[in-house]
Image (cartoon, helix red, strand yellow):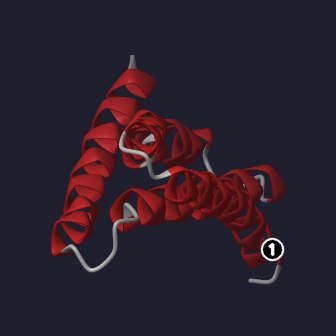
Amino acid sequence: MNDYLLVFVGGGLGSMARFALSRFNALGATPLPLGTLAANILSSCILGLVVGLVSARSHISPSVRVFFAVGFCGGFSTFSTFSFETFYFLKTGQPGYALLNVILSVLGCLGGVYVGFYFQKHT
C-alpha cells in the first residue's frame, strides 16, 4: 500500500510541474509546444538519473525509484499531449512542424535518459 501512496503523491507533484511548464506554450513565441517538449526531456533526464542511481547504489531505497520513476516522471511526462500536438500540426497542414516535434521529442528524450545516466555515474 505504501508504494501506491508514493506513486499518488509523486504523480500529483509531477502533474503540477508539467502544468507549470505548459504556461510556456501560452507565450506564443513559437508554434512548437515547448512546454511539453521541456517536460518530456526533463522527465527523461530525471528518469535516467533515478534509475541509474538506484541500480548503482544499494543504499538508495527502492521507494525512491517508485516515487520518482513511476510517480513523478509518470505525472510529469506527457506522451498523450505530445501525440495530440503532433496530430494537430498534421491536421492543420503543418507537416514540417509535426516532423520537427517528433524528431526533437524522440532525440531529446533519448538524450535526456543518457544525460541522467551519465550524470549519476559522474557524481
In this rendering, is residue 31 above or below 98? Answer: below
Measuring from the top left, give residue 121's x and y in whole percent: 83, 74
- What residue lies at 45% left-to-right and 66% top-to-bottom? 38
**60 sits to left or right of 5:** right
Relative height, residue 118 to residue 6 (above, below):
below
Q: Residue 69 placed where, x, y %?
A: 55, 44
Q: Residue at x 40, y 36 (%)?
A: 91
The quadrant holding residue 22 is bottom left
Say which quarter of the image contains residue 32. bottom left
In the depicted view, which residue is nearer to us: 100 or 122? 100
Disc 1 element: helix
Q: Quadrant of the C terminus?
A: bottom right
Question: Where does the image place residue 97, in percent across and percent down from the top left?
Answer: 50, 59
Position of 85 with respect to 68 (left or right) is: left
Crowding at mark 1 (Cα within 10 Å: few <14, some 14-19, many 20+): some
Please tell me which residue is depicted at 48% across the width and 47% down the height of the picture.
73
Q: Residue furthest top?
A: 1
Closer to the camera in the image, 121 or 58: 121
Q: Which residue is mark 1?
A: 118
Looking at the rendered image, the quarter that the N terminus falls into is top left
| 70 sits left or right of 78 in the view | right
Residue type at numbered disc 1: Tyr
